[in-house]
């Protein structure tokens, strides 16, 4: 069944008159996370076939900081430095790996930190970490988002459950990643509080 939402007269009028409906100091980019789970989205080949310079970049940071653009020139290589750390006015450009359908016509350009976009997950709600029936799915999704990978097998070892792989990852990941996961849980708790009042 398709969910429906009622709109107020103000919302309808604002939409019809093409008025902005929010103001923010950040730019956003959608992250179609369900397609990473089902391997059908156009963002997936870009991530899987990213150049080796981006090996340590997770899906979340890739969506936030990397754009696929037409290749015009290759004058911006920065060998030996982690690509996401480069703060030059010219942004690093990384070739797509062989096997990507646009490897000859497009490259990946890394955005400066100040120009990062905030990924907006599109799809069903992100699973809660505090629901035991959703725990395996939550762990799998957090690994997809925050652990660098190219193939699904990179996310966990053959003998590991999703929960075991996630716990192992949490013990080694950065504070920034932990904070992002915490923020996702806080969003669930805020919705719970809203619904209680």
Image (cartoon, helix red, strand yellow):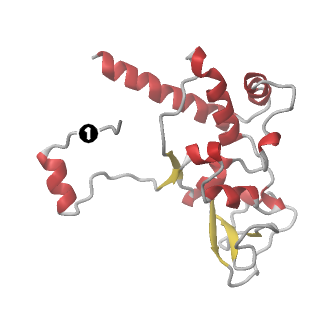
Quarter occupied by the C terminus: top left
Q: What residue lies at 77% left-to-right and 46% top-to-bottom?
A: 149
Residue 56 vs residue 118: left or right?
Answer: right
Q: Where in the figure is residue 107, as x and y percent of width and height?
A: 70, 72
Q: In the current view of this chain or complex, which residue is farthest to the bottom?
A: 72
Examine the image and state in which quarter residue 194 appears: top left
Report the residue marked by disc 1.
Answer: 5
Q: What residue lies at 81% left-to-right and 69% top-to-bottom?
A: 78
> For this rendering, which residue is in front, 68 or 176?
68
> For this rendering, which residue is in front, 38 or 151?
38
Quarter occupied by the N terminus: top left
> For this rendering, which residue is in front, 22 or 52?
52
Q: What residue lies at 80% left-to-right and 66% top-to-bottom?
A: 97
Residue 48 visible? The answer is yes
Q: Where in the figure is residue 29, as x and y percent of width and height?
A: 50, 55
- For label 1, the SS is loop
Q: Residues within 10 Å of mark 1 (few under 14, many from 20)?
A: few
Residue 85 visible? The answer is no
Q: Where in the figure is residue 121, as x and y percent of width and height?
A: 51, 44
Q: Where in the figure is residue 38, as x and y percent of width and height?
A: 63, 45
């Amino acid at each position: 069944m398709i969910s429906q939402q009622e709109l107020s007269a103000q919302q309808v009028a604002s939409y019809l008159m093409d008025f902005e409906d929010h103001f923010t100091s950040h730019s956003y980019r959608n992250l179609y996370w369900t397609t990473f789970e089902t391997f059908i989205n156009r963002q997936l080949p870009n991530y899987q076939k990213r150049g080796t310079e981006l090996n340590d970049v997770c899906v979340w940071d890739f969506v936030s900081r990397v754009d696929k653009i037409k290749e015009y020139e290759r004058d911006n290589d920065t060998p030996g430095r982690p690509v996401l750390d480069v703060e030059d006015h010219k942004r690093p450009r990384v070739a797509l790996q062989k096997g990507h359908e646009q490897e000859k016509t497009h490259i990946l350009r890394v955005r400066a930190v100040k120009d990062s976009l905030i990924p907006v997950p599109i799809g069903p709600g992100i699973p809660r970490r505090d629901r035991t029936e959703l725990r395996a799915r939550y762990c799998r999704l957090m690994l997809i988002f925050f652990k660098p990978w190219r193939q699904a097998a990179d996310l966990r070892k053959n003998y590991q459950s999703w929960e075991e792989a996630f716990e192992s990852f949490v013990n080694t990941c950065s504070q920034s990643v932990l904070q992002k996961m915490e923020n996702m849980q806080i969003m669930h708790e805020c919705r719970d509080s809203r619904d209680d009042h």
